[in-house]
Image (cartoon, rainbow, N blue to C red):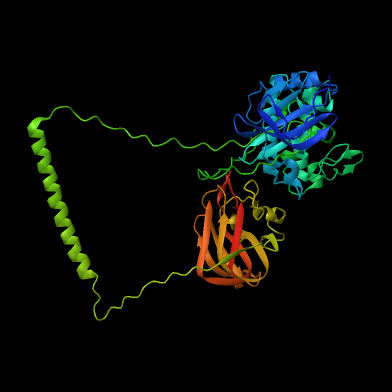
Amino acid sequence: MSSPAVEPGTKLAERFRLEDRVHESGGATLWKAIDEVLARPVAVHTFDPDFPRLNEVVTAARAASRLTDPRLTQVFDATEDDGHSYVVSEWVSGETLTDMITSGPLDPERAAALVAEAAEALAHAHEADQAHLCLTPEHLVWTAGGTVKLLGVGVDAVLADVTSEDAARADAEGLGRLLYAGLTGHWPGDEQEGGLPAAPMDDGHFCTPRQVTAGVPGYLDTITCRALLPESRRGLEPLTTPVEVAEALASVPRPMPTPTPMPAASSPLPPVTASRSDGLNTAAPQRPSTPPPMQYHHQPRPAGGGMLGKVAMTLVVLLVMVAVGLGAWTLGRSIGNAGTPTAEQTVTPTVTTSTATREVKPASVTGFDPLGDHEERGELALYAVDGKPSTDWHSESYDSEDFGRLKDGVGLILDMGQSVPVKQVSVDFGAASGGAAELRVGDSQDLGSMAVVQKFTDAAGKKTFTTDSPQKGRYVLIWFTKMPTYQGKFRGTVVDVKIFATK
């Protein structure tokens, strides 16, 4: 007897309602579903009755369900029967590495931090004899909650029918490919992956990251080559396991989780989007926790007290009433005398008016260093206006807050395309501390001709400039005059900037 067709609306185990078909390949279908018991989205894999590796997939999923590293997607259920066989796991919402590097390579430290997290998670999986073998940029996700998730451990290899005689070496090379992609925006594989351009070749070998992208630190170039291109680093020990890759990247600063504001009690959950993967694309955003209600502790009233206690209480109440009456009378006289205008005084009511504003998107953004011979990290400039808390523009790193006395400042300049009446500018300087910055507006990119409209004595956190009289200008410049501290050095950061003009 054939199994009933699996269609949207099908409910598995009287609990998991299939909603949207996300991906289908080789007899396996990935669905977005709803866990009606826990009211959360989940990922569900279903399989055709003739799927050749059904038993192996279910076995691998059950083994993966025992992994406890939070950076690995969690498997909730795996069932094989004559009706519907399926695997249920988390539903992951966020940006894949592919999404992050579509417009170009990441900041080297950020790319290394993401891969370092993945390497540590994969090292834990290998301790439990679980491998990945199919690492691509689609499997590495920066979640909506500001954490790293590695998709498909233990399951995707079975789905794709991929095996390896040396799983540790295969996964170490896979991590090297992810790091290469993050550093260069190119994919070092036999085929293009996720629309990324293929890595350039030199004498039959992939070019090293530093040969592809300027500014890649030497130590990250070396780590990538040791994991992926050992022929480029003769004399150095290759990295042959995820543990060794994790140890090599151990000193890289890690990305900070993005704080998520608590929505109002009546607000619906935000929409959930999935990161596409050939395997288990998982991970549901967790429902925000609700703070417990206030608890009030009532002191028990003492027993007894007798007549003496009642008399004392009455006297206290009378004294309080007298004190309150005297205070109110004195305050009333003071207010009455002060509130009467004299002949020389005129009382003018304050009129509050609100001015409608609109957000203005810049036509272009670039690093600004009028005294240097290049743009100050211009390749990162668009990250300051992409609205993503996981990306940022930042300057070069300096040895002192005064730029080593080489220049007066550096910054980020936004070109509006035309002169606009700037009413408000909000800038998120990130988690650095110290430093100082100016906000300048003008119709010319000449530093001296731009008016200083605001000075920030602490270039850290979120700052907002608002003026009653809009300042007209085509260019808005965030100009660092002192650099904030950063990992023992000094550099300026702009995570996000928004500009509002009057209508």
> 479 or 397, which is in the foreground?
479
Residue 90 relative to residue 426: left or right: right
Residue appearing at x 83%, y 39% in the figure = 188
* Number of numbered discs: 0
Q: Residue furthest bottom?
A: 343
Query: Residue at 56% across / 58% down in the picture?
Result: 426
- Camera-side residue: 374 or 132? 132
Residue 238: tell me if it is visible: no
Q: Does the rendering let one see residue 439?
A: yes
Q: Residue 207 appears in which quarter of the rendering?
A: top right
Q: Residue at x 78, y 40 (%)?
A: 180
* Residue 156 place in picture, x, y as percent: 78, 28
Q: Is residue 109 left or right of residue 204?
A: left
Q: In terms of depth relative to the viewer, which is nearer, 461 or 132?
A: 132
Which percent across, then down, holds residue 240?
A: 77, 26
Quarter of the N terminus within the rendering: top right
Left or right, 402 with reference to 61: left
Q: Quadrant of residue 91?
A: top right
